[in-house]
Image (tube, rainbow, N blue to C red):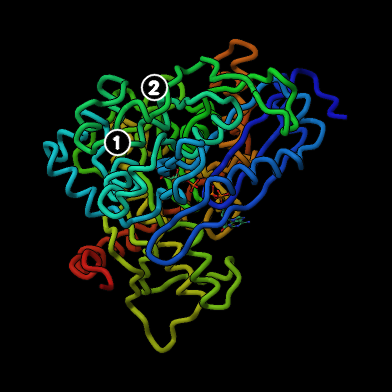
Amino acid sequence: MSAAEGPLVVGVDTSTQSTKALVVDVATGRVVASGQAPHTVSSGAGRESDPRQWWDALCEALRQCGDAAREAAAVSIGGQQHGLVTLDAQGEPVRPALLWNDVRSAPQARRLTEELGGAKFWAERTGSVPAASFTVTKWAWLAENEPEAVRATRAVRLPHDYLTERLTGECTTDRGDASGTGWWASATEAYDPEILAHVGLDQALLPRVVRPGEVAGTVHRHDLPFSKGTLVAPGTGDNAAAALGRGLRPGSPVLSLGTSGTVYAVPRHRPADPTGTVAGFADAHGDWLPLACTLNCTLAVDRLAALLGLDREAVEPAGGVTLLPYLDGERTPNLPHAAGLLTGLRHDTTGGQLLQAAYDGAVHALLAALDLVLDEDADRSAPLLLIGGGARGTAWQQTVRRLSGRPVQVPEARELVALGAAAQAAGLLTGEDPAAVARRWDTARGPVLEPVERDGATMDRISGVLSDAAALLERGTD
Ligand SMILES: Nc1ncnc2c1ncn2[C@@H]1O[C@H](COP(=O)(O)OP(=O)(O)O)[C@@H](O)[C@H]1O
Ligand SMILES: O=C(CO)[C@@H](O)[C@H](O)COP(=O)(O)O
């Protein structure tokens, strides 16, 4: 059936919109089977998903992989970061998970930053200044708004922890995903007792942080297409998994275009940005992963294309139109209450120009943060690695090329997060470094699009609108 040369492993990406599973041949990196099933996210004031839906989607994605999954010797799960999963005494969700793009906890983020020593304290202690995305702010929001849910909670998990635990029966997480909670100190690489006490969270409710290369457990269920004893790797957050899947080395920045837009790179030092633009995450490897994240990327641009009745590729040069597509509020720049903003409209403005302006607004935010993510002496002309669902779109590719002026590499491999999880699982079997596995698999293989002249005028125009409209964007629509 699979005609694989080596043992098989399963890599999973449980991200905001769907769960994807790949069965991968450890010897060659060839994807021998794959599956995908969608999730739903609430709309309105917050962004929530039922964790049980992630489990059902995982089961469905594995079912689509057929017999190949049954042959797998190890599995690993990469997942959307930060989501707050609260479980009761039976291990059932107390309420839906609060997701990374739910900005209701922006006041708690501000309050926690002030109460515990300010932005510099947080950056030095945890690597990051709390934003509404971080789990610690969601826990504080829950304590204020739904104290009965907090009282009923017997376990607190991240999305990838929840699924890993259902596979193994063991409560585990990893340093990469733990570093996005706000209660894991990058300075000590351990949970931070002072922060936990401050938000009234008992450390006993948290999972054990499994070391890179350690086994998290074995599959203990009979209702999945795995053989008994299949090894389960620690898993990690989706960005850290993609970094593993790329076998990332210092000097190669990644720009990921999915529900979130992210930009990250491997640094030489532990990151600690007191401005809060760069989150100082740990990676899944033992190193660090400074990252900036936007809330409005592919979904926001697709929403504008739908409003305009246009195909997502039907762009025309934007002219003087500026569109900040902050439909969900924004994290980078830090404007959690902002809404979308359009300026520069004329009688002859076309729908295609408006759509291009939306791409420009989304990419501007990521490129403006890129300079802060990179080490000072990083080569600013090295190719940007473009990944995530949006990387397949010509309009996305062209916008990134034009606004960055850099070469852009688009890997042929579509699912870098799931491949990174698979590389982590493969490392458990072979004893290899997962990043070396990914390099052996040549996961970054793909065309390099030559640089074009940088459109600095558009970058400057968008920066100007951001600064002129600061009061409006901070206030939002309320
Ligand atoms: N061919 C394509 N061109 C442009 N965008 C695409 C294409 N295929 C998928 N997408 C975008 O990819 C997004 C999903 O990307 P993905 O990285 O899977 O998201 P997530 O990991 O957040 O669930 C969709 O919102 C869609 O807009
Ligand atoms: O919040 C972040 C990173 O800090 C996001 O990148 C989430 O991890 C969600 O990722 P996608 O579902 O967009 O892949």
In the depicted structure, whether residue 264 falls above or below residue 473: above
User: Quarter of the image containing the N terminus?
Assistant: top right
For marks 1 and 2 on the same chain, the one whose residue lies earlier in the sequence: 1
Q: How many marks?
A: 2
What label does residue 182 carry, if any? 1
Viewer-nearest residue: 290 or 385: 290
Q: Rounded to the nearest whole Å, what is the CA distance between mark 1 and mark 2?
A: 18 Å
On the image, the x and y values in percent for residue 421 come to: 58, 30
User: Who's the residue at 61% across and 29% down the image?
Assistant: 167
Amino acid type shown at disc 2? Asp
Disc 1 element:
loop
Residue under numbered circle 2: 287
Q: Quadrant of residue 281?
A: top left
Q: Is mark 1 within 8 Å of ligand 2?
A: no
Identify the residue at the far top of this view: 431
- Local crowd size for mark 2, using a 10 Å CA cut-off: few (<14), some (14–19), many (≥20): some
User: Who's the residue at 40% across and 35% down the image?
Assistant: 154
User: Quick check: which quadrant has ligand 1?
Assistant: bottom right
- Local crowd size for mark 1, using a 10 Å CA cut-off: few (<14), some (14–19), many (≥20): many
